Amino acid sequence: MGLNTQQKIIFEIYDLYKKFELIGSNNKNKKSSKQIEKIKNKIIVKNIDNVNYVDKVQEILLSYVDIWGFVYKSSIKQWITTSKTINVAGIFYKNNLIGVVVYGEKPNYLKINYIAIDKKFKNKSLGVYFIDFLEKKAKKLKKKKIYAEVPKDNEGGLRFFIKNGFIIEGILKNHTRGNKDLVLMAKYLEG
């Protein structure tokens, strides 16, 4: 007797956890923590409300075009200037924008649309600053969780979210224009 769709998805989720559990236990990166230690006192995370950053935001997001596709300047400008439900925050190092998170505010949670770090600063654990920023914002707004949809083939993204306390809530099959599966991930907040 074969497995039904729900059972297959449960096994896929289990397999993902096992895969990243093994990777995580073998990947204690001391070099990365030393690199971040050097620059952490010079890092600021804040909402971006100035349209002068549109080009740089797009440049950073487009460096991940293979993961989520093209992002238009007009959309970024709208998020920065007029959107009430979608916000853009940045990591600034020595007053230079080096990372971007685009997130939405929903009734009970914050939803991460994109997280991207400038390729020159990638693999320095800087995404953690966005998680901390969003946790503080969510608690202030009395939200119960932070939510993200991650392409199943984005192993770096999945590893990042699991490492930062997110759990897998499900999988959306063939959910993108390119028929990619998305992994639903959430981090529940206390208090």
Image: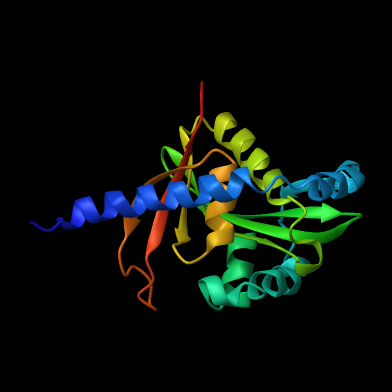
- Asked whether 43 or 18 is in front, the reply is 18
- Location of residue 139 (image quadrant): top right
Q: In which quarter of the image is the N terminus?
A: bottom left
Q: Which residue is located at x 41 percent, y 56 percent?
A: 183
- Location of residue 59 (image quadrant): bottom right
Residue 53 pos. (x, y %) = 76, 67
Q: Residue furthest left?
A: 1
Give the image's coloring scheme.
rainbow
Q: Which residue lies furthest to the top in this view?
A: 191
Q: Is residue 79 placed above or below 111 in the rendered structure? A: below
Evaluate whether residue 113 shows in this view.
no
- Asked whether 187 or 27 is in front, the reply is 27
Residue 113 pos. (x, y %) = 52, 58
Residue 152 is left or right of residue 86, and the answer is: left
Residue 45 is left or right of residue 15, and the answer is: right
Residue 182 pos. (x, y %) = 40, 61
- Asked whether 74 or 17 is in front, the reply is 17
Residue 124 is left or right of residue 93, and the answer is: left
Q: Which residue is located at x 81 percent, y 67 percent?
A: 120
Residue 127 is left or right of residue 111, and the answer is: right
Q: Is residue 44 placed above or below 145 in the rendered structure? A: below
Evaluate whether residue 156 shows in this view.
yes
Residue 27 pos. (x, y %) = 67, 49
- Location of residue 86 (image quadrant): bottom right
Q: How many marks?
A: 0
